[in-house]
Amino acid sequence: MRTWYMVFLRSTIISLISLVFFVACAQEDPGQDLGIDRPNPTLKAVDLTIGTAVVHAEVALTEAERNRGLMYRSSLRDGEGMLFVFDRDQQVSFWMKNTKLPLSLAYILSDGTIVQILDLVPFSEEPRPSSRSIRYALEVPQGWFARVGIQVGDKVQIPSLQ
């Protein structure tokens, strides 16, 4: 009797452990619930004026919005972009993980002065740091700054973001 009971108990325990294991493995990736593997939803946008050029830019205000940026986007037209707003002046670094669009990036001081323009390589995980503390960063389709004559030293008119 003891042998049968021990075999029954052992097989029941193994079955329960297996069930727990398979249920745990079958759960969806928790990151999917957060939308980490999907583009940002369309964010509030503003028009930024730089000389005579205007760019319609979505505004990434929160850390989550800034971290995701333009990842997973499939298109971005000339005259469109994303403005990254930081809480304080700081040195930052951008990369292109999960970003298939070729982009140009402008690092911008709190007074709107562009201090650096970089071209970014799709999917590159190489960090591209700012050369100094900045308050904003603006991503646009690669080459857009040059096509409209924008260069380091130009000022971006940034409307109130409240």
Image (tube, rainbow, N blue to C red):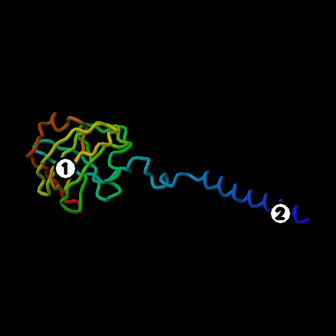
Q: How many marks?
A: 2
| Residue 6, label in figure | 2
What's the residue at 18%, 57% (across, down)?
135
Q: Give, as a three-letter code, the residue at label 1.
A: Ser
What's the residue at 15%, 47% (across, down)?
49
Which corner quadrant of the image does residue 86 belong to? bottom left
Side (left or right) of 89 relative to 127: left
| Residue 130, label in figure | 1
> As rendered, which of 14 and 79 lies closer to the eye?
14
Side (left or right) of 2 relative to 76: right
Asked if 97 appears above or below 162 in the picture, the reply is above
Which corner quadrant of the image does residue 79 belong to? top left
Q: How many other residues sit within 10 Å of disc 2, few (<14), some (14-19) or many (≥20)?
A: few
Q: Position of residue 90 (x, y in %)?
A: 19, 58
Q: Give, as a three-letter code, the residue at label 2.
A: Met
- Secondary structure beneath dot 1 equals loop
- Secondary structure beneath dot 2 equals helix
What's the residue at 80%, 63% (across, down)?
9
Tell which tag, 1 or 2, sits nearer the viewer.
2
Of pointers 1 and 2, the one earlier in the residue sequence? 2
Residue at the bottom extreme of this rendering: 2
> As rendered, which of 30 and 46 lies closer to the eye?
30
| Residue 46, label in figure | none
Q: Position of residue 130 (x, y in %)?
A: 19, 49
Quarter of the figure that contains the C terminus: bottom left
Quarter of the figure that contains the N terminus: bottom right
The answer for how far apart the CA atoms under marks 1 and 2 are is 67 Å
Marks 1,2: beta carbons within 8 A:
no
Residue at the left extreme of this rendering: 153
Asked if 99 appears above or below 41 in the picture, the reply is above
Q: How many other residues sit within 10 Å of disc 1, few (<14), some (14-19) or many (≥20)?
A: many
